[in-house]
Image (spheres, rainbow, N blue to C red):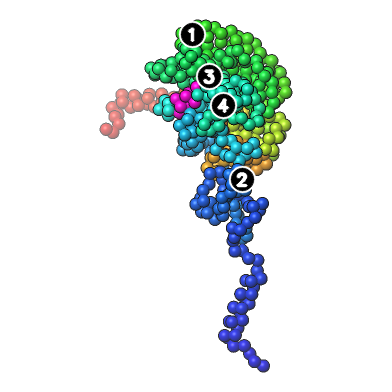
Amino acid sequence: MVYPTHTTIVTGACLLTLFAALIQPCFCDTCVVDNPDKQDCGYYGIDQDQCEQKGCCWQPEGQGSTTPWCYYKKSGPPPPPPPPPPPPPPPGQAPFSPSEVNTMRQYFLKNIDIQGTGGVVASPDPNTPGGSYYYHWARDGALTMHALQITSSGPSDYDTQMQDYSKWVVARHAESDPNNIDVRIEPKFELPSGAPYTGGWCRPQTDAPGLRAITLIAYANDLIKRGNRNFVTQYLWTGDSSSYNGGAIKYDLDWLAENWQQNTCDLWEEVQSTDFFWNRYTMRKALANGASFAQVMGDTQSMNKYNNVLNTLNGTLIRHYNGQFVFESDNRQQDACVICAFNDGNMNDGVFSAMSAEVAGTISTLNSLFSSSFPINQKDDAAGVPGILYGRYKGDSYAGGNPWVLTSGCLAEVLYRAANATISSNSLPEATVRDIWHGIVQDLNTGAIVEENLDLDTPAGLARALVLSGDGVLNRIRFHTINNDLHMPEQLDKNTGAEASATDLTWSYATILKAMAVRSASISALDRNTMNVSVTKSTSTDPSAIITPIMGVAVVGLIAVVSIVIYRRKQSHGYSPIQ
C-alpha cells in the first residue's frame, strides 16, 4: 500500500477547497441587474458618490424613469435592515431640537424663490404617483410665503424672497390665461417660466386669491411699519388700476369680493363645490384683513365693499358644524383640511376658536378616523410612540391612502394654539367640551401626562397637557423621518411609516415650522403663567398630610420658646456662652 505524502495531502486539500469554492453559491457582487429587479438603495437627490459609499450600484436612467438610479447589487447577502429610529425626546422636551429645526428650515428654503423668480416649488421630486411636483402651486406658494414670514427671526430673513414673490404675483396676474379661466384662479404654473400649466387639471381653484392676499397684506403691513411704503405702492396697492391692476393685493381681493360663491375644486383637487369650509374660512380672513388694509391705504370704497361681502360670508360658516364636527363640504364630510383651515383662517376673534366645541369635536372625530384607518398608528401606539398621524379624508385612495405630514403638522399647531388660548383666558371650557379635550390629550400623550401628574381640571394643567399632545404628534412625525435626516415627504406609508410619494414637500415643512413657532409661544406663556400656579394634582387628600407638618412647626416653635427662657435664666445667673 502506498501512503500519500504530506505534499500530496496538502495539494489534495487545496484542490478540494478550490472545488468546494466552485460549487458553493457565488456571493461575488455584481451591478448587472435587470431593471425590473433593481431595488432602490438611495433617496431623492442622492448622487453617485453618496450611492457608491453605501456599497450600491449607480446607473443613470432617463428623465422621468421609475427605475432607481441607485440600486442594490444583485447577489450577496441581503442589505441590512435600517436601524430602528431613536426614541422620542423625553416628555416636556421639544420634539425637534434647534439644530433639527434649522435642518428642516434649510430644506424649506431650498424650495423657495426658485432661480430668483419668486416661484415656490411644491416639491423637487419629478416622480410621484401624481407625476412631477416641480411646479408652483398657487395655494402652496401663498401658504409657504406666509409661513416664511411668521417663522423667521426678522425681516432680513425674508425680505428678498418676499419681494421676489410679490413681483412673481404681479407677473402672473399679467399672464394671458390659456385655459379660458381667470388667471387668478389657475392652480399651478411652470417653473421657472411662470407660464400657466396647460395640461388637464381640476380647475378653477378659488382659494388662491384670498391666500395670496393674506400673505401679501402681512408683508405690506410689515413694510409700512418699517417705513418702506414705496414698495407697497409700487407693487401691492398702487391706487391706480392701470398700474398692476391696482396692485397684487387689491387685484386678488377684488376678484374674491365679486366671485367668492363660484364653483371650485377642493383643496385636494379632486371634487367640486360652491361651499368648501377651507375656502370660506380663509376667504373670511382675507376679506377682513383686506378691509383693514384698504383703510390704511385710504381706500374707503374698497374697505366698505370687502366688509359688506364679509358680513354675508360670515353667515354661511356655521352650517358646516353638524353638532359633532366641522365638515368640509356636503360631498366631503370628514376631511383634515378643516384642521388646517382652523390655523390658516384664524383671526383670534372667537369664530371657530382653538378651544371651541367645534374644534374639539372635529379633532376627536378625526382622531377616531385616522387611528383606525392606518395600521402604522396602531403599531406606534403599541410601541409607546406618542401622537397620531393624520391622513387627508375618509376613504382617501390616492397613492394607497396614507398619512400626510402636512395634515399632521396642522393638528400639532391647533393643539399648541389651544394651549395658548387656555393660558391667555385662564379659564376652562364648559364641562362637556372639557371632557372631549380630556379624551384628546389622554389619547395623544397619556404617558407624559401621567408622568407629570397633571391636573386637567385647571387651566394651567390642561394647557400643559395640550402642549404635550402637540409634542406627541410631532414626535411621531420625527420618529418616522429622523433616519432620513428629517427630509419631510408628502406622505408616510400607512403600514410601515416609510416615506411615500413626493420628497421634500414644501408644505410639509411649512406646517411643522409653524407648529414649532406656536409651541415656543405656548411654552413662554406657560412659564409666565405657572410661576405661582400649580399644574399638578395634589399628591394626597389625607388630612394627616396637612396636620402633620403643622404639628411639626408647632413643636419646633415650642422648643425655641423654651430654649430662649432657659437661656435668659442662665444669663441672669451670670452665665455667658463661649465667645
Disc 2 marks which residue? 65
Q: Residues within 10 Å of mark 1 (few under 14, many from 20)?
A: some
> Up-down: is 184 above or below 382?
above
Of circles 2 and 1, which is in front? 2
Distance from label 4 to label 3 (Cα)?
A: 12 Å
| Amino acid marked by disc 3 | Ala
| Amino acid marked by disc 1 | Asp
Distance from label 2 to label 1 (Cα)?
A: 54 Å
For the question of whether residue 247 can be seen, the reply is no
CB-based contact (under 8 Å), mark 3 and mark 2: no
What is the span of residues highlighted in magenta in the rendered image?
A: 161-170
Q: Where does the image place residue 98, in percent across and percent down from the top left?
A: 46, 35
Which quarter of the rendering shows the N terminus? bottom right
Q: Nearer the viewer, residue 183 or 145?
A: 183
Disc 4 marks which residue? 138
Which quarter of the rendering shows the C terminus? top left
- Dot 4 or dot 3, earlier in sequence: 4
Q: Nearer the viewer, residue 240 or 363?
A: 240
Q: Secondary structure at mark 2?
A: loop
